Amino acid sequence: MTTTLRSITTATTHKNLMSTSYFKELVHDLSQHCSTPALPGAQDTDAMLDRVIVLELLYQLDGRDNQSHPHHDTYTNLWQNYIKLKT
């Protein structure tokens, strides 16, 4: 699964090729895997890599890559905001 995630991440770096709905679906699919690691703590490196990918996608979706965003360069509350939007 990790190889696929890496290739997807590489492809999604080109925003003009991917729609926002694609990002949202990808975050949803990955969040299911990374929220239930198979090993205790940070030993499940695949799940930890998925968490990094999810947070980066949420960062991009929230527009925090834009320097004018009030939370530019921070990852604070990204996951909490995503959970609120899901419900």
Image (spheres, rainbow, N blue to C red):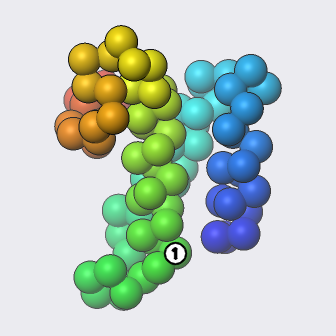
Q: Is residue 2 left or right of residue 54?
A: right
**Residue 51 sits in quarter:** bottom left
Q: Residue at x 41, y 47 (%)?
A: 55
Q: Residue at x 69, y 39 (%)?
A: 12
Q: Residue at x 36, y 69 (%)?
A: 36
Image quarter in which the N terminus is found: bottom right
Secondary structure of the residue carrying tag 1 is helix
In x, y percent, where is residue 61? 47, 26
Tell me the residue that label 1 is attached to.
46
Q: Nearer the viewer, residue 25 or 78?
A: 78
Q: Residue at x 28, y 37 (%)?
A: 74
Q: Nearer the viewer, residue 6 or 83?
A: 6
Decide: is 53 above or below 83.
Answer: below
Q: Is residue 66 left or right of residue 11?
A: left
Decide: is 54 above or below 39.
Answer: above
Q: Is residue 80 visible?
A: no
Q: Is residue 65 left or right of residue 15?
A: left
In x, y percent, where is residue 78? 29, 37
In x, y percent, where is residue 23? 58, 33
In x, y percent, where is residue 9? 66, 49
**Residue 43 sits in quarter:** bottom left
Label 1 neighbour load within 10 Å: few <14, some 14-19, many 20+: some
Q: Is residue 75 visible?
A: yes
Q: How many marks?
A: 1
- What residue type is disc 1 on? Asp
